[in-house]
Image: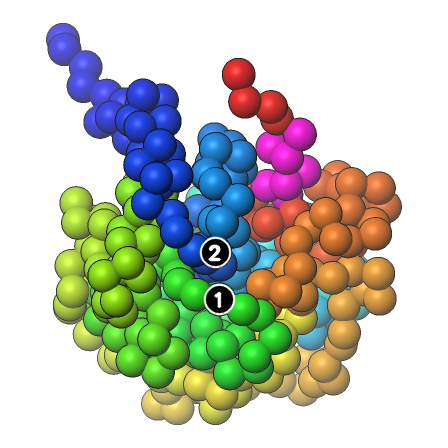
């Protein structure tokens, strides 16, 4: 049977080098380009794109890693919840490794606490069925990409009248932190590479306000090296032609309007919360979601509110993850990078996540181009 490699063209070294040559010829001014998503950061580092581009092009890493931006007090919520032997807490991916103020979910699981790592949100239904006498709490994380799955799970729980599943909602939104970074004036950013998977759900329309407010181009890019190189070229050409607009490079998956059905499902059960504290950045108004009041009986923050800590907690004093997320520092600027802080023993969240900038620099930063 013939197998088709759909990614081959987007990783073709000949195309990558050809785009690099065109960019070198056309780049006529310094540009600080923030790739909002951590997935883009890893592609840039893995394929050495930062090394083959001209020095005028500077990549600035953004706050688009849902694990990296989770503040310690939210992790402390999860740790507090698993102290009750009647509770099972389940979450996705790297979240169990993120350090809170005193512990992490990984450490608590090693102590015998009920912590489950999910491969998909709907796996929690099986856990709930197998443990009818336990409270099963879904610690939901992610940007707009993963929010529809949480909304679909909420709908399933309601329709099937499942009584022992609760939701601790930590879903965050892309535009508000971008606006907060631009409004702070700390980082000099000329243009943005917009997230891929987020934009599949939201559509590229969510970036229009950023372009209008700050006159910064936004090009929504796929995750492959050819995608990113092409997006850089598009940004250069916007400046050369004195244009500022939202463009969709990732047309094979992203539209202007996005997935309307997914958006409707999210809006059915969730709404913006007044404020959410971003790790290293601070409180950003309407930058995250919460369950609507009519579903408060499913809301772990309300049902178990009396045992949840409510004090904001700063990061480790030596960790500059906040500055990295704000685009005013890079991992190599951190004194503990690769020394006291490694993926095996992370001090900050940017080293924990598979999408974190520090993890990308640690894994790929010393690679030399052949």
The residue sitting at the top extreme is 1
Q: Quadrant of the N terminus?
A: top left
Is 103 or 282 nearer to us in this picture? 282
Element assignment for label 2: loop
Is 147 or 246 nearer to us in this picture? 246
Q: Is residue 363 within the magenta segment? A: yes
Quick check: 27 above or below 72? above
Q: Which mark is on residue 30?
A: 2
Q: Residue at x 44, y 47 (%)?
A: 40
Q: Which mark is on residue 313?
A: none
Give the residue number, with chain letter if any, for mark 1. Answer: 189
- Magenta: main secondary structure equals helix
N-terminal of the pair, mark 2 or mark 1, is 2
Q: Residue at x 59, y 41 (%)?
A: 360
Q: Is residue 71 within the magenta segment? A: no
Q: Residue at x 45, y 78 (%)?
A: 179
Task: Kindly tell me whether residue 202 is visible in this rendering.
Answer: no
Q: Quadrant of residue 260?
A: bottom left
Magenta segment: 359-366
- Disc 2 crowd rating (10 Å Cα; few below 14, some 14-19, many 20+) is few
From mark 2 to mark 1, how far is it between C-alphas? 11 Å
- Disc 1 crowd rating (10 Å Cα; few below 14, some 14-19, many 20+) is many
Is 354 or 37 nearer to us in this picture? 37
Q: Is residue 100 left or right of residue 126?
A: right
């Amino acid at each position: 049977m013939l197998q088709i490699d759909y990614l081959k063209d987007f990783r073709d070294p000949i195309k990558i080098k050809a785009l690099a040559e065109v960019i070198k010829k056309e780049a006529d001014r310094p540009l600080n380009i923030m790739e909002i998503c951590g997935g883009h950061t890893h592609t840039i580092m893995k394929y050495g794109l930062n090394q083959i581009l001209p020095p005028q092009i500077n990549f600035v890493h953004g706050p688009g890693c849902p694990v990296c931006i989770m503040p310690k007090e939210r992790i402390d919520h999860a740790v507090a919840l698993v102290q009750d032997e009647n509770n099972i807490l389940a979450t996705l991916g790297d979240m169990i490794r993120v350090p809170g103020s005193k512990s992490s979910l990984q450490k608590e699981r090693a102590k015998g606490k009920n912590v489950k790592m999910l491969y998909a949100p709907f796996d929690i239904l099986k856990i709930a069925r197998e443990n009818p006498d336990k409270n099963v709490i879904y610690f939901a994380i992610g940007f707009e990409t993963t929010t529809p799955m949480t909304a679909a799970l909420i709908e399933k729980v309601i329709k099937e009248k499942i009584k022992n599943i609760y939701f601790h909602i930590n879903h965050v939104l892309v535009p508000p932190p971008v606006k907060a970074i631009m409004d702070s004036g700390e980082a000099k950013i000329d243009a943005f590479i917009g997230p891929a998977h987020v934009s599949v759900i939201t559509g590229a329309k969510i970036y229009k306000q950023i372009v209008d407010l700050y006159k910064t181009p936004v090009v929504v890019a796929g995750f492959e090296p050819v995608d990113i190189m092409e997006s850089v070229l598009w940004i250069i050409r916007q400046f050369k032609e004195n244009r500022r607009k939202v463009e969709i490079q990732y047309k094979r998956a992203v539209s202007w309007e996005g997935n309307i059905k997914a958006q409707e499902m999210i809006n059915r059960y969730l709404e913006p919360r007044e404020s959410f504290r971003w790790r290293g950045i601070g409180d950003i108004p309407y930058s995250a979601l919460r369950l609507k009041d009519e579903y408060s009986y499913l809301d772990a923050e309300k049902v178990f509110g009396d045992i949840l800590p409510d004090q904001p907690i700063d990061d480790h004093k030596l960790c500059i993850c906040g500055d990295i997320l704000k685009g005013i520092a890079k991992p190599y600027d951190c004194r503990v990078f690769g020394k006291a802080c490694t993926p095996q023993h992370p001090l900050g969240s940017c080293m924990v996540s598979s999408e974190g900038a520090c993890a990308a620099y640690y894994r790929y930063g010393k690679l030399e181009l052949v």
